[in-house]
Amino acid sequence: MKKLSSCLLIIAIGSVFQLVNAQKWEQVGKKGDWESTVAVIAMNSHLYSIEKDGTLFQTDKTGTYEQLGKKGDFDNADVLVAMDGEIWTVEDGSLYRTNPTTVAWQQVGKAGDWKDTEAMVALKGKLYSIETSGTLYETFKSGAWKQIGGDGEFTDAEMLESMGDYLWTVENGTMYKTSIQAMRWEQVGEKGEWESTVAMVADRGFLWSIEKDGTLYKTGMDGKYVQVGEGGLLKDVTLIVALDGMLYVVEDGTLYRTKG
């Protein structure tokens, strides 16, 4: 599966309730419930996850989950994004939107228009995607799309997030923010500060990121950052997701959360 813009995973070590520098990690649901999860998004006070076999699940804050739709309905999903209460996916190069309440879905735009999509995020009711060529596109809910900027301007983008009025990317270890409205980008923080970042999520005006050594950081829109918790505790993490002021993570197939 391709790299996803929005999603999950941090590590929680030790007991179900663990205090680390004033952070309390709490197990959510049963141990091992998430061992087959490959992608997760957060919206409508729920987590929506896809399993290895392509089955979609909805999980509430207590850890109670239910299957949505038929088993394997999403086995061709390469990209998973939450936008305005709906689930948006790219499957076999085509864009789809799914109502999580009725599980009714519909194709958006022309078949195959998103076949080269590597990463996608939602921002103010639109989708922004980067193709394998490094070119950025803006997509409306109707499926109409247009290129943003020049060809290949995001060739070096390794991570993509949305926050405020900006797209945030990590390129060659450096953080950048791009204003779609002004069509202007700027470097955030020092060059190379993000070279060890393996996952990040935007929540309440901050970027929460995890380094290769397992350390969690909180970064403001000005690029200033602080370490959160003890260094190195999250070394097995690959993804992270935020929901209603909490950070949710998966470790060894189990879901945990802490207040961000």
Image: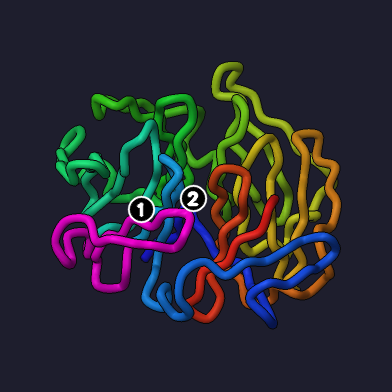
Q: Residue at x 39, y 70 (%)?
A: 37
Q: Residue at x 85, y 64 (%)?
A: 21
Residue 65 in view here: yes
Residue at the (57%, 70%) spot, across then down: 27
- Above-or-below relation of 41 to 10: above
Q: Main secondary structure of the magenta part?
A: loop
The amino acid on which the numbered mark 2 sits, given as a three-letter code, is Ser
- Amino acid type, residue under disc 1 in the picture: Val
Q: Please state the extent of the stretch shown in magenta in the rendering.
A: 50-76
- Dot 2 and dot 1 residues touching (CB under 8 Å): yes
- In this picture, residue 191 sits left or right of residue 66: right
In the rendered structure, find residue 18 and report the number of the disc placed on it.
none
Q: Quadrant of residue 23?
A: bottom right
Instruction: Report if residue 63 lies within the magenta region.
Output: yes
Q: Dot 2, crowdedness within 10 Å: few (<14), some or many (≥20)? A: many
Q: How many dots with numbers?
A: 2
Instruction: Measuring from the top left, give residue 47's x and y in whole percent.
Output: 42, 53
Q: Find disc 2 in the rendering and name its residue.
A: 5
Reading the image, the residue beneath label 1 is 79
Which quadrant would the N terminus be assigned to in this image? Answer: bottom left
Query: Residue at (15%, 39%) from the top-left corner?
Result: 106
User: Residue 18 appears in which quarter of the rendering?
Assistant: bottom right
Q: What percent of the width, then of the height, locates residue 138?
A: 40, 29
User: Residue 30, image x and y in percent?
Assistant: 45, 75
Q: CA distance from mark 2 to mark 1?
A: 8 Å
- Secondary structure at badge 2 equals loop
| Mark 1 residue element | strand
Q: Is residue 124 above or below residue 157?
A: above
Q: Horizontal placement of 70 versus 214: left or right?
A: left
